[in-house]
Image (cartoon, rainbow, N blue to C red):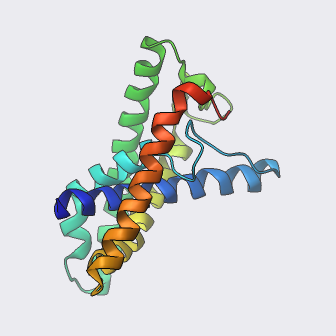
Amino acid sequence: MGKIRDLFILFIIFAVCGWIYEVAGTVIVYGYFENRGFLFGPWLPIYGFGGIALYALFGRLVRKPAKPVRVILRIAVLVVCIAVITAALELAASYLLDAVGIGYRSLWFYDGEPLNFDGRVGLFPSIRFGVMGVIALYLAVPLWERFIGMKNKRLLNISSYAVIGLFLLDLALRIPLGSNM
């Protein structure tokens, strides 16, 4: 059960980082706070899934020691790779949301962005996702490794299961309580 718990905690860390990114962007660009996403808590599951996918693809590479020049080159390549991957995922998600009747435009729309495709994906948002993905891998993964490596396993288990429980409760209450948007 420990491995599943540990991956779920990494999922939560990425989901919370995504929520912070989205909320901070709204505050900076529009000047007001808005709880982003479809859940009530400070997490966006799409970022959790994306972060886990990026960790699966690039986690070993990020932890691999290298000389500073190679690390800089590695980061540049990672930004491009993550930008392409997240653009492809965002494009696929937009079509999926349209297919199930939600419509991606209710969650994002890049029509005003230069070099966008049908408002579904845009060059600059994809580059931002690439940069933020690299930052998340280099910051979130060490934070997660430190957390799951805690010597006090009882505190680790209690705090992990409390956060997991809150997330699952939030998910379960979505239908009866309605949208937070």
- Left or right, residue 116 beside residue 46: right
Q: How far from the left and from the top, in percent, is residue 57?
A: 21, 54
Residue drawn at point x = 55 percent, y = 46 percent: 124
Determine whether 54 is above or below 113 in the image: below
The answer to whether residue 67 is visible is yes
Residue sitting nearer the eye, 118 or 107: 107
Q: How far from the left and from the top, in percent, is residue 112?
A: 68, 32
Determine whether 82 is above or below 78 in the image: above
Residue drawn at point x = 21 percent, y = 83 percent: 65
Residue drawn at point x = 31 percent, y = 85 percent: 68
Image quadrant where one finds the N terminus: bottom left
Quadrant hosting residue 5: bottom left
Residue sitting nearer the eye, 106 or 80: 106
Determine whether 175 is above or below 60 in the image: above
Determine whether 69 is above or below 93 in the image: below
Image quadrant where one finds the C terminus: top right
- Left or right, residue 177 beside residue 150: right
Q: How far from the left and from the top, in percent, is residue 168?
A: 42, 44
Residue drawn at point x = 19 percent, y = 77 percent: 64
Residue farthest along the right direction in this orientation:
31
The answer to whether residue 142 is visible is no
